[in-house]
Amino acid sequence: MRAGPAGTRRAATLTIPPHGTSFAGSPMDHTSKPQRMMPPELDARSAAVLREIVEQYVETGDPVGSRTLSRRLPIALSPATIRNVMADLTDAGLLFAPHTSAGRLPTERGLRLFVDGLLQFGDIGEEERLTISRALESKGRSLQDTLGEASAMLSGLSAAAGLVLAPKTEGAIRHIDFVALGSSRALVILVAADGQVENRVIETPRGLPPAALTQAANYLNARLAGRSLPELRRTVAEDMAADRTQLDETASLVVESGLATWTGEGRGGALIVRGQSRLLAEITHVERIASIRTLFERLEAQETMIKLLDLAEQSDGVRIFIGAESGLFGASGMAMMVAPARNEADRIVGAIGVIGPTRINYGRIIPVMDYTARLLGRLLG
């Protein structure tokens, strides 16, 4: 996996087998300690030095000097030899010296080489599995709330911004109900054929009689018959155009308002982001703040949801993007990780991701994202 010239680097795809299985002889073995793998560009000494510098950068963010490396490297090298190796890695564009520091930090190209061939990761602990499972527990919660909890969980475990994407789906609807919330609001409850529940709040005419809500729900449920939401909308529109609804004016308003809450969105069509403030935690330069603001704006755009899904569809496992590699944003010093969520039929039904500084703990987050993506796939499947 050669790094290649600037502008042509590709993102790494790291595929982790399901828990309890492994790729025999693979450095990506999910059930045992991964073996070390050396990129063809580097000899053993250079690979060891680069790996240790990146791991220290991920842990502390500070430049690493030759004396520190001589104490921490798994192979015995003198500080003078390490300085020569560091100089070679710097000439190759894999390390740089910030300011006048004698220590080194990895460049984005060095980080790419690290995640392509030197990254090590293991399994997640039982406590983290429980945390993830609880975040994706949908019983008694709307899908939107569950996805929000999952995004917050990813943010907390990665110390970065967490993303959860549930693309637009058009499955059959089992039941619709309306519950009065006060004098001018009502809750719309939509139950899908797969048991998922979504809620929306709508505005209603002040003083709306409860009978109007009941009439609206009865009318819609009588026309479901396994229809999806778009099909139901078309049926209702045809009924209203032909004056076949037999609804009074207030009940008609409830029906229109209830269906309109999902118009253009579809069931589950959402990109939920939590932990954006974490992206500002280590920003010290004004120009970086401007880049982060641009990223925030992109995350709010509909095109971003489409782009994220495209990135996830190009991979079977966790995919890592350094800097501007994703094409989603151009902020240097930032990294993004994306994983597809697949259902039992191996169809992509969503995606998850994290966005953070390039010193994000890749080895820790990869198994977390893999496990979360598999659970989310079952939830959305």
Image (spheres, grey):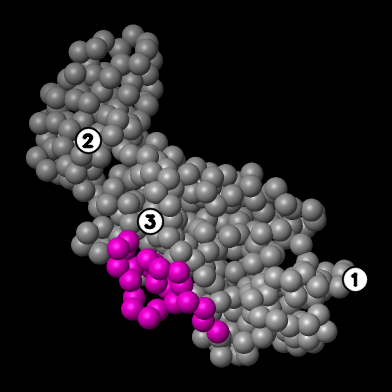
**Image height of 189 relative to 150, above or below:** above
The quarter of the displayed image where residue 50 is located: bottom right
**Identity of the residue drawn at 20% across and 24% down:** 216
Give the mark, 1 or 2, whose residue is nearer the N terminus: 1
Q: Counting other residues with Cα less than 10 Å from the Cα at mark 2, is it few (<14), some (14-19), or many (20 or more)?
A: some
Residue at disc 2, secondary structure:
strand
Inter-mark Cα distance, 3 to 2: 27 Å
* 217 left or right of 112 in image: left
Of the pair 164 and 298, the residue shown nearer to us: 164
Give the mark, 3 or 2, whose residue is nearer the N terminus: 2
**Image height of 236 relative to 19, above or below:** above
Disc 3 residue type? Tyr
Give the mark, 1 or 3, whose residue is nearer the N terminus: 1
**Residue 249 seen from this side:** no
* 281 left or right of 276 in image: right
Residue at disc 1, secondary structure:
loop
Inter-mark Cα distance, 1 to 2: 62 Å
Q: Which mark is residue 100?
A: 1
**Image height of 311 relative to 40, above or below:** above
Classified by dominant secondary structure, the portion drawn in magenta counts as loop
- Disc 3 target residue: 371
* 252 left or right of 64 in image: left
All told, the count of numbered labels is 3
- Disc 2 target residue: 191
> What span is colored magenta in the figure?
16-38
